[in-house]
Amino acid sequence: MSGKESYWRFLVAPILIAAVVLSLVYVSVSVLKIVPLKYTEALYVVITLILGYYLVAAFSSLFERVVNSLYGPKKASVARTTLKYVGYIILAFAVLKIVGVSGVALLAGGTFGGLVIGLAGQQVLSNVLAGLLLLLSRPFEVGDRITVTEWQYGAILPSYPPKYFSDDLLYPGFTGVIKDISLNYTLIRTDQGPLVKIPNNILIQAAFIVHGIDKRWVRTRYEVVKPVDIDQLLEAVREVVRKNEWVVDPESARITIQNITSTSIVLAIDALCKGELEDPPRSSLLYDLERTINVIKH
């Protein structure tokens, strides 16, 4: 879609439609008197809600495109969500003005009305308020790669038999890239490919890890069968880490002995590697380790 077509679709078209509809309503009510006067307020409320919703969506989409072209997708998502909040608040006041609700009446009925609305739309309102809190606190942004897990169950041991006396932890959640933060949901593209919509009121209570986009710590476990000279083994592993193309800072890498049994030695290599995912650097390290260790053992 070209720039002119987008401009027509998201700005000019809604304004023209609103002008035509309001003109027809005015002629029907005031000139031709087709619509009875007692139904006028209800008609105006319905028209205002429909057109207001459409205009807010159109202007927020257009504003997102403009901000995206100037400042990038992270700022664009925040700008669009903010404009939607402001637009819906203005729309609510416009409807109250049409039905003739004054400030005093609004305050007088606020307690009871708030109780009814709160009980009826608890989940919806909690999602919206959670989305607003995420927008203000900004613990993560569009484009960040995060792992989301419920705080009550932060980590569990593997349910399968762990190999090499592993103390690996499984995080029962989703890992992926934030694609959108809307009023009700946060959209995540998981590492496996599918899109996941998480309600904001769930996300605001969850624990999450914000991963670096360019680099991350990767743990690689490797078991060496005895007999082997342990000093020579550790030096060979350090050399593999220094030469590996995925390792960003070899000097910061940590090589520890996880376990020693009667038949093997289990090592753990923690290294800062480039890339978003753990599998490519871990695969590369395992490949280099296997080739190097086989050489020193023979």
Image (cartoon, rainbow, N blue to C red):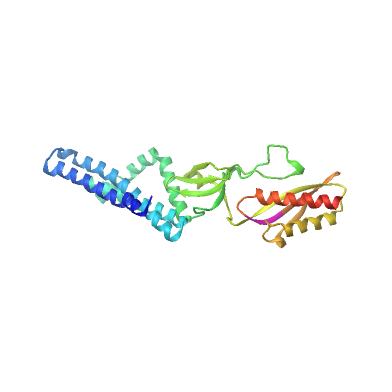
Up-down relation of residue 173 to residue 251 (above or below)? above
Q: Position of residue 267 (x, y in %)?
A: 77, 50
Q: Would you identify the image quadrant in which residue 63 lies?
A: bottom left
Query: Is most of the magenta stretch helix, strand or loop?
Result: strand
User: Looking at this view, is 41 or 272 the one in front?
Assistant: 272
* Magenta stretch, residue numbers: 270-274
Q: Position of residue 137 (x, y in %)?
A: 48, 55
Q: How many marks?
A: 0
Q: Is residue 24 visible?
A: yes
Q: Position of residue 82 (x, y in %)?
A: 39, 54
Q: Would you identify the image quadrant in which residue 237 lies?
A: bottom right
Q: Is residue 107 visible?
A: no
Q: Determine if the magenta segment contains residue 51.
A: no
Q: Position of residue 291 (x, y in %)?
A: 78, 50
Instruction: Residue at 26% x, 41% y: name it.
Output: 46
Instruction: Residue at 88% x, 48% y: name it.
Output: 227
